[in-house]
Image: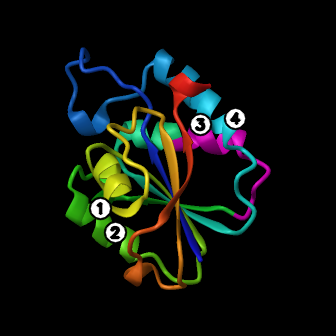
Amino acid sequence: MKKLTLIRHAKSSWNNPINDFKRPIIEEGIQKTIKVATESKNLFNDKSLIWVSSAERTKQTAKLFLSIWDENSEMQIQFKDDLYTFDLNQFEKIVKSCPNVYKNLILFGHNSAITDFVNKFGDIFIDNVPTSGYVSIIFEGDDWNKINKGKTDKIIFPRDI
């Protein structure tokens, strides 16, 4: 069995005249991320691999989550330039490239790729995964490359906390 957790980056601002890749999160995003990270703190019990888009807002979001999940020292984090994508097909290829030694993969990324992936592979339709949103999906089997329709396991959105 494999568990994939998808976390959309925290809220950032378009008002700052800065390159999209370098946009930081804003205070509202920090507060919502803290709520979701606290709510999800105890949901991991096996060694997890964490892949994070190299965009500034996803790196900041992941660091906030990890500061709250701090006692789980079995997590390994990797920043990945190719996760800076909004495309479902590219996102799917990235997920399916996860080494099979990992039962749990946690991805910090961007919309619309996250919402599209959740709706293609999960069993609950979600109109939009909001910023700081958390969705996990359980897949039968032991091969990431062969994942297909899974079971949506947990949904944590800031508005629901």
Secondary element under disc 3, as helix, strand or loop, is: helix
Alpha-carbon distance for marks 4 and 1? 26 Å
Which residue shows up at 68% across the image and 36% down it?
A: 39
Asked whether 90 or 146 is in front, the reply is 146
Q: Are marks 2 and 4 in contact (CB under 8 Å)?
A: no
12 left or right, relative to 45: left
Residue 91 tag number? 1
Mark 1, other Cα within 10 Å: few <14 / some 14–19 / many ≥20: many
Query: Which dot, 3 or 2, sits closer to the camera?
Result: 2
Residue 155 magenta-highlighted: no
**Kind of residue sitting beneath label 4:** Thr
Secondary element under disc 4, as helix, strand or loop, is: helix
Mark 2 or 4, nearer chain start: 4
Alpha-carbon distance for marks 3 and 2? 23 Å
Give the magenta part as a residue range. 62-74
Toward which corner of the image does residue 147 lie, by quadrant?
bottom left
**Kind of residue sitting beneath label 2:** Ile
| Residue 118: x %, y % from top left | 38, 54
Q: Where does label 4 land, which residue?
A: 38
| Residue 68: x %, y % from top left | 70, 39
Alpha-carbon distance for marks 3 and 4? 10 Å
Toward which corner of the image does residue 104 lie, by quadrant?
bottom right
Q: Are marks 4 and 1 in contact (CB under 8 Å)?
A: no
**Kind of residue sitting beneath label 3:** Leu
Q: Where does label 2 land, which residue?
A: 94
Instruction: Name above or below for residue 26 compared with residue 8.
Output: above
Alpha-carbon distance for marks 3 and 1? 23 Å
113 left or right, relative to 45: left
